Amino acid sequence: MTQAFLDDRARLAGRIAVVVGGGGGIGRAVSLGLAGAGVHLAISDIDGAALAATAAEARELGVEVLAIEADATVTTALSGFYDDVLRTFEGIDILVNVVGGVKRGQFMDSTPDEWQADIHRNYGYALESIHRAVPSMILRGGGSVVNFTTIEAHRGAATFAVYAGAKAGLTNFTRALAVELGLKNIRVNTLASDSTPSAGNLKAISAELREEVLAVTPEQHQGGRRMYIPMGRAASVDDIANGVLFLVSDLAASVTGTTLHVDAGTYAASGFMNWPNGLGHLPAPLGNALELLFPEADGQAA
Ligand SMILES: NC(=O)c1ccc[n+]([C@@H]2O[C@H](COP(=O)([O-])OP(=O)(O)OC[C@H]3O[C@@H](n4cnc5c(N)ncnc54)[C@H](O)[C@@H]3O)[C@@H](O)[C@H]2O)c1
């Protein structure tokens, strides 16, 4: 068996990819993963410094890179980016819409303007992005789109309600579009992550909670991860990028309209926790977990 076995099956080298939000964090890992596989890149990001650094790293890997600073949630900026992409490259084979995110909060404390912004940032801009990319894919005889969804699109995510709804919309839009575009040889999938350490992940929580998160010991962090994540560790940005590489490659030639959960098992667990003190996996706190959680045993805990 040769080292090229997977490359021959994946057929990524020489393709052209657009990565919206490809400068930092998860987006950087996706961009560099694609570049490492020999894919030419058009990257946009709101963070100019991260974008420039990632573009330079990708060029070192020997691929062509177009890097444009643009806010994906501003229609004219996203459209201008696509004008540049189509002027620079002969077409688009791959599109990855990474941009998304939320600031947690109670729905009843939020405003209509905030809902519109969250819906556009997690659903609307992706429609605009896909609408610009797909005509080029059709001309080239096929393509692959990956939209970033989340575990919160698949459960009742309190304090994430608008985000959860928008991502669920994006997820089912993806499924529907996959059916529409099947005969054009264009595959459309979503990738769902959960708790991957990134700047966006930390921005989702309040400054107060962020301080608390950063203050706990590594052992306490690890204890929490073992309880919540079946594999006892969060998926890394590179694990996420590997999921994208699979979805956009010919390894996934017949995979369309589906969601790949890259989360070390949290979606599978769906609420089952690995409780400490030897209790093991249970869907609800029982036994001495209750004593630990509610030491006063007054039954009035919040
Ligand atoms: N990190 C997680 O644990 C997690 C969990 C579930 C879902 N997700 C999803 O994964 C995707 C990436 O999430 P993240 O926040 O962790 O990524 P991230 O913090 O790694 O950010 C990725 C890149 O997007 C860029 N970006 C942000 N807003 C932008 C905008 N308006 N226009 C252009 N670029 C922009 C950032 O500058 C960054 O370079 C999102 O769609 C998010 O909903 C992440």
Image (cartoon, helix red, strand yellow):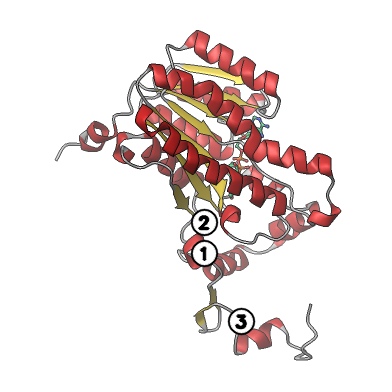
Give the Cα distance between marks 2 and 1. Answer: 7 Å
Taking the image as shown, residue 182 lies to the left or right of residue 10, namely right
Q: Residue at x 60, y 27 (%)?
A: 128
Q: Residue at x 50, y 60 (%)?
A: 267
Give the Cα distance between marks 3 and 1. Answer: 16 Å
Q: Amino acid at mark 2?
A: Ala
Q: Residue at x 75, y 91 (%)?
A: 297
Q: Which residue is mark 2?
A: 234
Q: Is the residue marked by circle 1 packed among few (<14), some (14-19), or many (20+) residues within 10 Å?
A: many
Ligand 1's quadrant: top right
Disc 2 residue: CB within 8 Å of ligand 1: yes
Q: Quadrant of the N terminus?
A: top left
Q: Is the residue marked by circle 2 packed among few (<14), some (14-19), or many (20+) residues within 10 Å?
A: many
Q: Residue at x 32, y 25 (%)?
A: 13
- Residue 101 versus residue 208 in the image, above or below: above
Q: Quadrant of residue 148?
A: top right
Q: Amino acid at mark 1?
A: Ile
Q: Which mark is residue 229?
A: 1
Task: Please report whichever mark, 3 or 2, sits nearer to the chain's N-terminal start.
Answer: 2
* Near-viewer residue (24 or 130): 130
Q: Quadrant of the C terminus?
A: bottom right
Kindly indicate whether the residue at mark 2 contacts the one at mark 3 (C-beta within 8 angstroms): no
Task: Please report whichever mark, 3 or 1, sits nearer to the chain's N-terminal start.
Answer: 1
Taking the image as shown, residue 151 lies to the left or right of residue 264, namely right
Q: Secondary structure at mark 3?
A: loop
* Near-viewer residue (5 or 127): 127
In this rendering, the label closer to the viewer, 3 or 2: 3
Q: Quadrant of residue 81?
A: top right
Q: Which residue is mark 3?
A: 285
Q: Quadrant of residue 52?
A: top right
